[in-house]
Amino acid sequence: MSVSAAGNSNFISNEAIMEWMQTKTDGIYGHMRESMDTSNTRAGAEDALNTVKAKLVDAATRKLPIDDALALVNDTLKKYGDEFPEVKDALQSIADDLNPKQAAHLARPDDVTSKSTDAHGRIIKTTKKGIPPVKVDKEQTDSWSKQISDKVEALSKQDQLGLINIQEFNAQLNQAKQTASALMDSADKAASAIISHIS
């Protein structure tokens, strides 16, 4: 990290020091901002994966249709899958398993009606049976939960490394500011000494 004097002069103006500091810190601020944005997005991906896991477990435990959980799986893949391969690794197989089943379920008629008749052909009983929705069992969700937890842990480790990078960028900014401040202080003292010798 060096600041050069203009031309053959040994004097460095405060303006030159400020320009150097601005040039030096612009790049650091850019990297720091990018790292912070990635860290925030990664945290959102982790939260989304944990919510998907909870929804799937809840659907299996309460024997609920997977509509809400599957919608969340698809939304999370769409939002974070391209940026974070871990999200795709965690959820793509779940989507590939459940989406075709859900599509087949939704393509069927809402109700199937069966009729019972007596010997004379008169209807004695009409039964309406709804098409059962797609559900998941505990064994499936246990496997999926482990898969999701492993990827959340991987993202969390990346986040820790990202925070170390952010701290390093912050240290570089502080160093640049301290260097500029020390140079300006030194230049001011030199200028004061010259003025005192003249007068």
Image: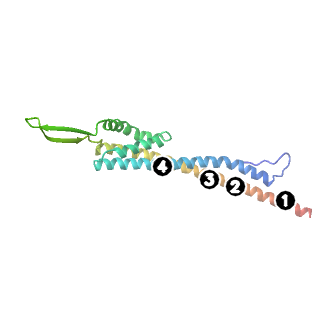
For marks 2 and 4, the one nearer the N-term is: 4
Marks 4 and 3: in contact by CB < 8 Å? no
Q: Which residue, given by chain and number where applicable, does mark 4 sit on?
A: 44
Q: How is colour applied across the structure in the image?
A: rainbow
In the rendered view, tell whether residue 53 sits above or below residue 107: below
Earlier-in-chain disc, 4 versus 1? 4
| In this rendering, position of residue 10 left or right of residue 48 | right
In the picture of the structure, the residue carrying the numbered disc 3 is: 170
Locate residue 192, reporting x and y percent. Answer: 84, 62
User: Which residue was labeled with disc 1?
Assistant: 191
Q: Quadrant of residue 197?
A: bottom right
Residue 83 visible within the image: yes
Q: CA distance from mark 3 to mark 4?
A: 23 Å
Between marks 2 and 1, how big is the CA–CA gap?
21 Å
**Image side of residue 60 versus residue 92, left or right:** left
Q: Which mark is residue 113?
A: none
In 3D space, how far apart are the residues under numbered discs 3 and 1 (Cα atoms)?
31 Å
For the residues labelled 3 and 2, say whether their Cβ atoms are less than 8 Å apart. no
Contact check, label 2 and label 4, Cβ < 8 Å? no
As helix, strand or loop, the secondary structure at mark 1 comes to helix
Mark 3 or mark 4: which is in front?
Answer: 4
Judged by depth in the image, the label closer to the viewer, 4 or 1, is 4
- Front in this rendered view, residue 44 or 31: 44
Tell me the residue at 36%/46% (across/down).
68
First reached walking from the N terminus: tag 3 or tag 2: 3
Residue most toward the left? 119
How many residues crowd mark 2 within 10 Å: few (<14), some (14–19), many (20+)? some
Residue 179, image x, y percentages: 72, 54
